[in-house]
Amino acid sequence: MAINRIWYGVRVAGVSQNGAESTYTNFTAIHGLQSLDTSQDFGLELVSEMGQGAPYDYTEQVPEITVSMEKVLDGTSPIYNLAFGNNTTVMTASEATCSMVVQTCASNQLNAAGTPELEATMTGLYLSSLGYNFVLDGPSTETIEFVGNHILWGTGDHALISGALEWGSDAPVSGVVLREDVDMDNSIFPSADMGANVIFQNVNISANLGREDLNQLGYRIPYMKTVQLPVEVTTDITVLSLGTGIQVTGVDIPCTHSQLTQNRQITVKTCQGLTVNLGAYNRLRTITENGGGVDGSNATVTYSYVTYNALTVGHTEAPEPE
């Protein structure tokens, strides 16, 4: 058997909370994985010299590894929790590392079973960005990106990772999260800003950690990849427009510290056990109305909230932090 091409049925990925994982006993398979993209940037820089048009030399920086994934939300653990443990805050995750393995089996198999033909192991991965998208059409999703400096490619000489998928036996626990599975009764939205009788359309949550290498003399590998604090976390809530809004006035009132917006609690829960808690300091930043034109589309209003350093993700099936 051989790999003549790579398709979704023969590739499986797993995550370990151990950032220096070197064995194959502590990786847990990601269920519901939709896409997995990797890139390797060698940081090539040109060195020129006076008197010569050809390159004098090339220097390489430390290779930058980027891993981007999307997973459907369901009754299994999110990738974020597999990497950092249950109910971990984004501030705790910002200084933690995890490991990942991607295993590929022969392309003529129906599923990733047996000994893989190829393995890619990435250690010392830092969280770079995180997002949760709750939508009207299709499954809701988790998007996540990691960055690091280490990737090892090898032939498959290990068993498949723990919890790997078997043909016909893997199915989402409690089903994938559809629009009716967003637990509106137990979720918390800023209704004081949006008014009564809100008809929700989409909720998009995202955090970008903006990593930078912290280097030191005498070493090529970064001491660590630091986060540009504060971590900005945004929540965009789109609702059907019913013609209501917040009163805005540009009249100056001297010696008055008046504000049109207030701190709000935002928490999104699903019937499959996911909780995304953004804390109580979310502040309305913009209101945007779109649609309602001659194309027949319905008018919608997007309320964009921002908070900082506050994002906690939990799931009933997530592992505890190690």
Image (cartoon, grey):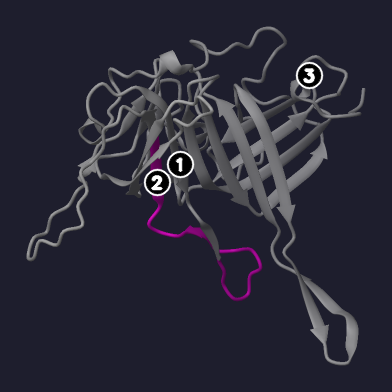
Residue ID at (11%, 59%): 257
Residue ID at (81%, 40%): 154
- Quick one: quadrant of the C terminus? top left
Q: Indicate whether 200 appears above or below 311.
A: above
Q: Which mark is residue 114?
A: 3
Q: Circle 1 sits on which residue?
A: 206
The amino acid beneath tag 2 is Val
Q: Does the rendering let one see residue 26?
A: no
Sequence-first disc among 3 and 1? 3
Q: Indicate whether 252 appears above or below 235.
A: below
Residue ID at (78%, 19%): 114
Q: Would residue 31 be found to the left or right of residue 193 on screen?
A: right
Q: Which mark is residue 233?
A: 2
Q: Position of residue 52 (x, y in %)?
A: 90, 87
Q: Indicate whether 239 appears above or below 250.
A: above
Q: Position of residue 316 (x, y in %)?
A: 40, 20
Sequence-first disc among 2 and 1? 1
Sequence-first disc among 3 and 2? 3
Label pair 2/1, CB-CB below 8 angstroms? yes
> How busy is the neighbourhood of tag 3: few (under 14 within 10 Å), some, or many (20 plus)?
some
43 or 93, which lies in front? 43
234 or 176, which lies in front? 234
> How busy is the neighbourhood of tag 1: few (under 14 within 10 Å), some, or many (20 plus)?
some
Residue 169 in the magenta stretch? The answer is: no
Start and end of the magenta stretch? 214-237
The amino acid beneath tag 1 is Ser
